[in-house]
Image: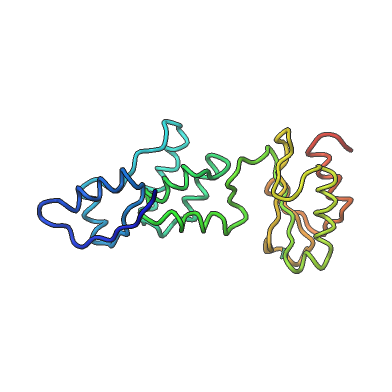
């Protein structure tokens, strides 16, 4: 169970450090850190939790966090590195980031669920993001999505059983001038029609044109 504790200045007998250590072990992210506490914790080498596993990808994430050096202020960049390394963000990863950056897990979870580009579930080999922002919606984005759902036989937010395609939606991807827009494997395609989208998806899934 996670619990947030706020502690005053460290005392001379190191009780605060001892308490922090126990809290970190017991609750994962127990402290709301002030700059003073953070400096003290750095001296006490309490700022860095152990990596969740010996998986080499954690070293990439860890190196990124060390380079950024600003606890909490670069959360999005750290989450990007995590997602690039693992393909998605699972609960253990989010807890590790919260502990390493000394911010509440609720904030890490809130940021990772706010942005469409972060995924909390494993993704397929290919991704398709259909924009359903206002400009795209009024120009038929919902029809594009329906056509893709019919072709791939999955609903938005799902991955095909063979893990080849994940279908996602977004609220404006910043390309309103070419609405309706979709993003296939990171490449934006504009002025999409349902037919074009189906052709693209069939090509990705390897059972069409
Ligand atoms: S609404 Fe779709 S790109 Fe802006």
Q: How is the image coloured?
A: rainbow
The residue lying furthest to the left in this view is 12
**Relative side of 119 to 183, left or right:** left
Q: Quadrant of the C terminus?
A: top right
Of 113 and 180, nearer the camera is: 113
Of 27 and 86, nearer the camera is: 27
Task: Please name the residue shown 32% across and 44% down the image.
Answer: 26
Q: Quadrant of residue 137?
A: bottom right
Q: Quadrant of residue 202?
A: top right
Percent across and percent down for residue 146 are: 83, 53
The residue lying furthest to the front in this view is 1
Q: Is residue 28 above or below residue 114?
A: above
Percent across and percent down for residue 170 are: 68, 58
**Relative side of 176 to 114, left or right:** right
**Relative side of 58 to 4, left or right:** right
How many numbered marks have been drawn onto this rendered protein structure?
0
Percent across and percent down for residue 90 are: 52, 43
Q: Is residue 117 above or below residue 133?
A: above
Percent across and percent down for residue 199 are: 86, 45
Task: Please name the residue shown 36% across and 56% down the image.
Answer: 71
**Relative side of 31 to 55, left or right:** left
Find ligand 1 in the image and state its quadrant.
Answer: bottom right
């Amino acid at each position: 169970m996670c619990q947030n504790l706020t502690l005053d200045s460290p005392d001379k007998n190191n009780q605060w450090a001892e308490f922090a250590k126990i809290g970190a072990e017991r609750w994962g992210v127990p402290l709301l850190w002030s700059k003073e506490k953070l400096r003290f914790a750095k001296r006490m080498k309490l700022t860095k939790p152990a990596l969740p596993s010996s998986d080499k990808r954690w070293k990439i994430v860890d190196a990124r966090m060390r380079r950024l050096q600003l606890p909490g202020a670069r959360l999005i960049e750290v989450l990007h590195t995590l997602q690039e390394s693992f393909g998605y963000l699972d609960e253990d990863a989010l807890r590790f980031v919260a502990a390493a950056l000394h911010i509440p897990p609720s904030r890490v979870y809130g940021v990772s669920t706010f942005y469409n580009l972060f995924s909390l579930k494993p993704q397929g080999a290919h991704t398709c993001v259909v924009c359903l922002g206002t400009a795209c919606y009024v120009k038929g984005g919902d029809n594009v999505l329906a056509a893709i759902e019919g072709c791939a036989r999955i609903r938005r937010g799902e991955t095909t059983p063979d893990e080849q395609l994940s279908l996602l939606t977004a609220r404006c991807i910043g390309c309103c001038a070419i609405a309706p827009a979709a993003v296939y494997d990171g490449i934006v395609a504009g002025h999409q029609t349902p037919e074009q989208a189906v052709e693209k998806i069939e090509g990705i899934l390897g059972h069409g044109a």
